[in-house]
Image: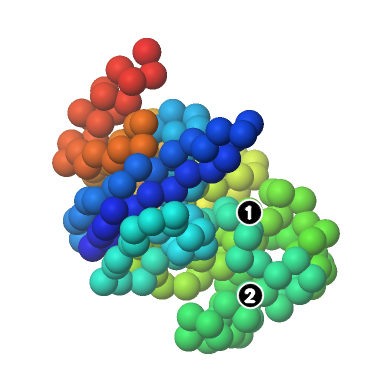
């Protein structure tokens, strides 16, 4: 379960304060994999960071009765001066998993070769996404927050990413952002729609997609 209690977040844009998340109060059900729909600039990535607590709200709070990943693909929680291996081992200790097992899994999965032992700041955006996705998939969370990351890499790597993510979904839930609606249908069984600062839960994914398309028309 994830619960929003008066959650509010905004930003100053061109000397004007723009509210992105507006006094959101809603409880999301346990055990559902949710597609997060919304137009460009609607605040989807902001909402994921608020859920993960990697960003502070202006007001209100987010509560959960389970463990939640950081937004997969978001590198803000990683130390730029540590190597990929050092970041991996640090997060293993933070989340209480075996450091060697996680390191072996991530090094094999991410396929970044010797860069695994180089500073994170030297990575390309693709390598950062591979590393962050690999670490998150190697740690058992109750809910995974995923922002477009299964689109990273070539076709073979994308297939591998989807296979690993699909395996995790057998035991966990997710909130997934992806502009590929067919891929959302593959992983999600319900949806939340973010529009004009408000979030609406849809038990039926197709209904949410139709509403989203209507909002975008």
Number of marks in picture: 2
Q: To which residue does mark 1 refer?
A: 129
- Where is residue 122, by image quadrant? bottom right
Q: Position of residue 201 (x, y in %)?
A: 22, 42
Say which element carries label 1: helix
Q: Work out whether residue 101 can be spotted.
A: no
Residue depicted at x 44% and y 56%: 57
Q: Position of residue 79 (x, y in %)?
A: 70, 70
Q: CA distance from mark 2 to mark 1?
A: 13 Å
Seen in the picture, residue 94 relative to 217 is either above or below; the reply is below
Q: Residues within 10 Å of mark 2 (few under 14, many from 20)?
A: many
Q: Residue furthest left?
A: 203
Q: Who is closer to the viewer here, 148 or 104? A: 148
Q: Position of residue 18 (x, y in %)?
A: 49, 36
Q: Earlier in the sequence, mark 2 or mark 1?
A: 2
Q: Work out whether residue 54 can be spotted.
A: yes
Residue depicted at x 20% and y 28%: 207
Residue depicted at x 36% and y 71%: 67
Q: Who is closer to the viewer here, 35 or 117? A: 35
Pick the quarter of the image with the C terminus. Answer: top left
- Where is residue 38, by image quadrant? top left
State the scheme by which the image is colored.
Answer: rainbow
Q: Position of residue 210 (x, y in %)?
A: 26, 23
Q: To which residue does mark 2 refer?
A: 88
Residue depicted at x 56% and y 59%: 133
Say which element carries label 2: helix
Q: Residue furthest front?
A: 15
Seen in the picture, residue 201 relative to 30 is either above or below; the reply is above
Pick the quarter of the image with the N terminus. Answer: bottom left
Q: Is residue 174 left or right of residue 178?
A: left
Q: Residues within 10 Å of mark 1 (few under 14, many from 20)?
A: many
């Amino acid at each position: 379960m994830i619960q929003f209690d008066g959650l509010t977040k905004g930003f100053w844009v061109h000397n004007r304060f723009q509210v992105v998340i507006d006094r959101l109060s809603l409880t999301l059900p346990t055990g559902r994999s949710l597609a997060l729909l919304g137009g460009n600039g609607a605040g989807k990535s902001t909402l994921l960071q608020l859920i993960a607590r990697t960003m502070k709200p202006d007001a209100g709070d987010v509560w959960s009765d389970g463990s939640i990943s950081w937004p997969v693909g978001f590198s803000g929680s990683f130390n730029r001066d540590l190597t990929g291996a050092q970041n991996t081992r640090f997060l293993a200790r933070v989340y209480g998993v075996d450091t060697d097992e996680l390191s072996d899994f991530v090094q094999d999965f991410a396929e970044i070769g010797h860069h695994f032992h180089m500073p994170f700041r030297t990575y390309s955006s693709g390598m950062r996404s591979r590393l962050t996705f690999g670490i998150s998939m190697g740690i058992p969370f109750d809910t995974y927050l995923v922002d477009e990351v299964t689109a990273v890499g070539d076709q073979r790597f994308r297939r591998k990413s989807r296979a690993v993510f699909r395996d995790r979904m057998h035991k966990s839930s997710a909130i997934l952002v992806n502009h590929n609606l067919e891929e959302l249908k593959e992983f999600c069984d319900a949806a939340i729609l973010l529009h004009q600062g408000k979030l609406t839960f849809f038990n039926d994914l197709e209904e949410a997609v139709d509403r989203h398309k209507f909002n975008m028309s």
